Image (spheres, helix red, strand yellow):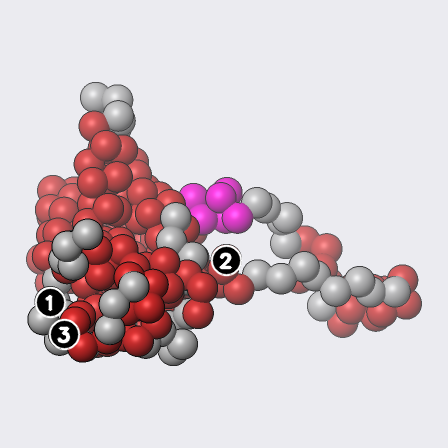
């Protein structure tokens, strides 16, 4: 089968899912494709460019998912609903790729059409809501960073260690707010509430 940039990105994503960000190499990608690493350089200049292409693919998939989510909203949906739909679409798109959050967080800082499309639509939503232009860029960037960071934390979650009754009682006495009063929420509900809190903060800018 002919070697193409798309096939190289496919192999890069599959290899990345197995070995992670720092373990990825062009040699491993070439092995997965059944060719020599030198053959890849006719299409991709190196690991940095490959990582950027992979991150761009995740962003483009998230943009398409966001388009679908926005189209499904009812006519009476608010701008906060639109922000939540875009954020949830990005979260789910990242989750579909093992290590996807690390890919977006640590990939080379290059502009890509996928990332710019996500940012552009968020800016349109915020501007349409009446958020002042001076604040929109920071607001959109904060949203995107929050989603990436949230999924990064989800990917790193491990089962809570077992504690004895004695240890639990000690923790409850020392940290009562954390142990007793913080609500126990699913990751999905926690994410939705976090986005709504951010939107509530943005809304104060509209009121000003």
Taking the image as shown, residue 23 lies to the left or right of residue 69, namely right
Number of callouts: 3
Say which of 187 and 171 sits in front.
187
Residue 64 in sight here: yes
Q: Answer yes or no: do the residues labelled 3 and 2 have beta carbons within 8 Å?
A: no
Please name the residue shown 42% across and 70% down the image: 20
The image shows residue 92, relative to residue 67, as above or below, that is: below
Question: Residue 88 lies in magenta, yes or no?
Answer: no
**How far across and how far down the image is residue 137, in percent?**
15, 62
First to last magenta residue range? 187-193
Of the two numbered discs 1 and 2 in the rendering, the one whose residue sits closer to the viewer: 1
Of the two numbered discs 3 and 2 in the rendering, the one whose residue sits closer to the viewer: 3
Please name the residue shown 16% across and 71% down the image: 39
- Determine the secondary structure under disc 1: loop
Residue 132 in sight here: no
Q: Earlier in the sequence, mark 3 or mark 2?
A: 3
Residue 154: mark in rendering: 2
CA gap, disc 3 and disc 1: 5 Å
**How far across and how far down the image is residue 186, in percent?**
57, 45
**How far across and how far down the image is residue 166, in percent?**
90, 67
Say which of 176 and 67 sits in front.
67
Residue 11: mark in rendering: none
Q: Quadrant of residue 98?
A: bottom left
Residue 43: mark in rendering: 1
- Determine the secondary structure under disc 3: loop
The residue that disc 3 covers is: 41
Please name the residue shown 39% across and 48% down the image: 96
Taking the image as shown, residue 185 lies to the left or right of residue 205, namely right
């Amino acid at each position: 089968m002919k070697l193409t940039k798309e096939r190289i990105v496919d192999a890069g994503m599959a290899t990345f899912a197995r070995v992670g960000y720092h373990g990825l190499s062009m040699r491993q990608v070439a092995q997965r494709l059944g060719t020599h690493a030198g053959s890849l350089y006719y299409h991709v200049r190196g690991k940095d460019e490959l990582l950027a292409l992979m991150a761009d693919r995740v962003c483009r998939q998230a943009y398409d998912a966001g388009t679908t989510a926005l189209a499904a909203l009812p006519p009476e949906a608010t701008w906060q609903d639109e922000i939540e739909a875009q954020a949830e679409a990005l979260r789910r798109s990242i989750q579909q790729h093992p290590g996807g959050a690390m890919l977006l967080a640590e990939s080379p800082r290059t502009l890509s059409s996928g990332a710019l499309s996500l940012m552009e639509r968020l800016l349109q939503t915020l501007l349409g809501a009446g958020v002042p232009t001076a604040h929109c860029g920071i607001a959109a960037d904060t949203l995107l960073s929050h989603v990436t960071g949230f999924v990064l934390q989800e990917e790193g979650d491990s089962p809570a260690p077992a504690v004895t009754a004695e240890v639990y009682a000690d923790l409850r006495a020392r940290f009562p707010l954390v142990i007793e009063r913080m609500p126990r929420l699913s990751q999905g509900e926690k994410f939705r509430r976090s986005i709504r809190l951010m939107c509530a903060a943005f809304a104060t800018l509209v009121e000003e």
